[in-house]
Image (cartoon, grey):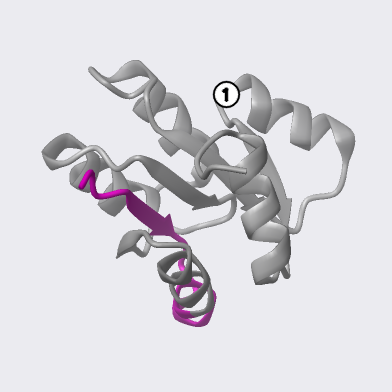
Amino acid sequence: MDFRTCLIVDDSRIIRKVARRIVEGLGYEVDEAADGAEAFAYCTGAMPDVLLVDWNMPVMDGITFLRRLRAMPGGKRPKVLFCTIETRPERIAEALAAGADDYVMKPFDGEILQSKLTEVGAIAA
C-alpha cells in the first residue's frame, strides 16, 4: 500500500492539531512543522505527498517556503494547499503564482479540507 504523507506547516499548534485530526481521518500519515524553515529541512529529507502551508509564520513564511520547495529536486510533485486568513484576490493570486495548487480559508473544517484535497487530486473523488 502506498502511504500518503502530509506535512502540516503552521506556527499554531492548535491549527496543526485540528488539521492533523482531519487529514489522518482521510487516511494520511501526518507530520508537522512549525515554520517554513522546519518544513524545508523536512522536505530535503522526505518529500511529502501533500502539504498544508500557513502563510504568516516566523522564521520563514509560507510564500518563501513554497517558492523554495518548488525550486528543489522533486519539489514540483507534492500537492500544496495554502491555508490562510488572506481574502484579497491579489494575495491568493500570489500564492497560486508561487506554486500553490489551491488555497483554504481559515478557519476550515473537515468537509472543506476534504473537498479541496479532492479538487487538487490528492484524494479520490
Q: Quadrant of residue 43?
A: top left
Identify the residue at horizontal 64%, vertical 69% (top origin): 110
Bounds of the magenta segment: 1-17
The reply to whether the magenta stretch includes residue 107 is: no
On the image, the x and y values in percent for residue 40 come to 28, 41
On the image, the x and y values in percent for residue 32 come to 32, 64
Q: Which amino acid does label 1 sit on?
A: Ala
The reply to whether the magenta stretch includes residue 11 is: yes
On the image, the x and y values in percent for residue 4 come to 31, 48
Identify the residue at horizontal 68%, vertical 43% (top origin): 103
Q: Is residue 7 visible?
A: yes
Nearest the eye: 85 or 118? 118
Identify the residue at horizontal 60%, vertical 30% (top origin): 101
Nearest the eye: 38 or 125? 125
On the image, the x and y values in percent for residue 34 come to 36, 64
Identify the residue at horizontal 59%, vertical 50% (top origin): 55
Residue at label 1?
Answer: 98
Residue 11 position (above or below residue 98): below
Q: Quadrant of residue 33?
A: bottom left
Q: Is residue 59 visible?
A: no
User: In what element is the residue under mark 1?
Assistant: loop
